[in-house]
Amino acid sequence: MNFDLRSPTLHIIIALLAGLGLGLAYSWLISPVTYVDASPAILRTDFKDQYRTVIAASYASTHDLPRARARLQLLGDTDPVGELSAQAQRMLASGEPFESARPLAQLATDLQQGFASVANTNIPFAVATETPIPEIPFIEPSLITETFVFEEPTLSFEQTPLIPQPPITTSTPRPTSPSNPAAGSPFTLVGQDTVCDTSLKEGLLQVMLMDSRRRQVPGIKVIVTWNQGEDTFFTGLKPELGNGYADFLMKTDTVYSIRVVEGGSFVPNIAAPTCTDPNGASYMGGLLLTFQQP
Amino acid sequence: MSSNLIKIIITAVIGIAIGILYGWVIDPVEFTNLTPGLLREDYRADYVLMVAEAYHGEINADNAARRLAVLSSEAPSVVVTNTLDYAHVNGFTENEITQLQQLLTAMQTYQPQGGTAP
C-alpha cells in the first residue's frame, strides 16, 4: 500500500491526530481536572486510617452504630469490619498501646454483632433555659427548679437481644469509656482440645475467652511465653472468628506458657500436637484453649 | 494562505478540542491518594463533628488538635469556627453544635505539647 505524502487527505488526518494528541496532553498532563470536592473514598491510605480512627473514636463516645456504619461506607471499603480489625492489628504491631486500638476493635465487634454493645450515651448537654438571678430574699424550691431546667440525660440501649440490662431508676451518669467486661472473676481453663484440621495453619493456637454466661469477651490481653521470647495478643481483633477469639502460631518443638492477664490464669506446657492426615502423613496440628469465668 | 493549510489548521483545532473534551469530560484523570484538605465541605464538616464527638468522650485536646491538623494548615480553632458556621447554616442539631462549641473552646485555649502526631 503506497501513500502519497502530498495527499491533502493524509495531511488532514495527521493534523487531526496531532491535535488530538495535543488536546489529550493538555487535559491529562498540563491542566488535568482538579479535585476540590473529594470524597473520603479516594483519600490516601494513611489518611483513610486516620479517618477510620476518628470514626471509631467518635463511636466510642456516642455509640451511634448506624451513624458509624454510614461514615465507614464513605471510605468505600469492601469489608469495613476487616479493615477496622486489620488497622487495629497494625497499630498493635507498631507498638501502639491497646487503648489506642480498642475503639477500632470495639467498633468492628459491634458492627459484626449488629448492635452497640454498650449503652447509647449520646447525652445532651444540660441547657439552662433562663438564667436570671432573682433578687428576692427567699426562693421556693419549686421556683428554683423552674428557673433552671436541665434536660434529663437519656440513656437508651440499642438492640440487646442477648444481654438484658437492668432498669435504670436513678439519674444517668456522664458517658464514660466502656468498662472492661472481664473485670471480676478470673478466667479459668475449661477446655484444651487438639485440632487436627489440614485447612488451618499448622501449629495454630486458638484461644477463646468467655464470661460466665458463655458470651465471648473481647479486649482481653493474653501473653504467650516460651524459652526464647514472649508475645502478646488480644481477643476480639478478628471479630469474624468471634469476639473472644485470638490466635497465635506455635513452632515445632517449642513449649509455651499461656497467661490471661485479666484474671491471672496461667497454663504451662503447651505444645503443638502431632496429627495424622488420611494418607498417614504426620503434620503439626493446633490447639483450642477455652477459658471461662466461673 | 492556501485552502489546504486552512483545512489542516481547522482539523488540528478540532483534534485539540476533541482531545480536551475526552481528557476533561469523558475520561478525566482519576485522582486517588488525596489529602483530607481536598474533601468536600460537608465531609470536612462531618470529620470535624466526629473530632468534636470524640473530644466530648475523651477530653483530650492533644488528640483533637492532631486530628484537626490533617484537614488544614490553619489553626484548629479556625477549622472548628468554619465548621460551626457551616453547622448553623446546614441544620446541625443543638447537641452537635454544642459539642462543636465545646471543641472550639478547647482549641482556642489549646497549647501544643510538642508531641508527635500518631
Image (spheres, helix red, strand yellow):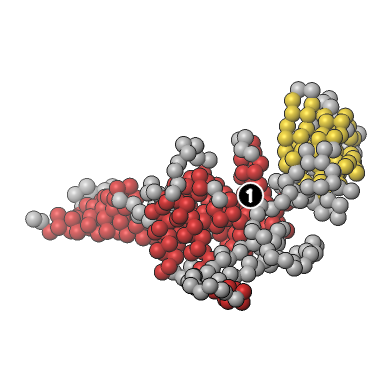
Camera-nearest residue between A55 and B76 = B76
Camera-nearest residue between A113 and A167 = A167
The residue tagged 1 is A104
Q: Residue at x 53, y 51 (%)?
A: A51
Which residue in the rendered view is the most extreme toward the top?
A228
Q: Can residue A24 be seen in this view?
A: no
Q: Where is residue A162 in the image (x, y as percent from the top left)?
A: 80, 62
Q: Can residue A238 be seen in this view?
A: yes
Q: Which residue is drawn at 51% across and 47% down?
A: B61
- Kindly identify the amino acid type of the residue bearing the numbered disc 1: Leu
Which residue in the rendered view is the most extreme toward the front?
A137
Above or below: residue A184 compared with residue B14? above
Q: Where is residue A76 in the image (x, y as percent from the top left)?
A: 55, 56
Q: Position of residue A223 (x, y in %)?
A: 76, 34
Q: Is residue B11 left or right of residue B75?
A: left
Query: Which image quadrant for residue A34?
Result: bottom left
**Tag 1 secondary structure:** helix
Camera-nearest residue between B95 and A76 = B95
Above or below: residue A248 compared with residue B22? above
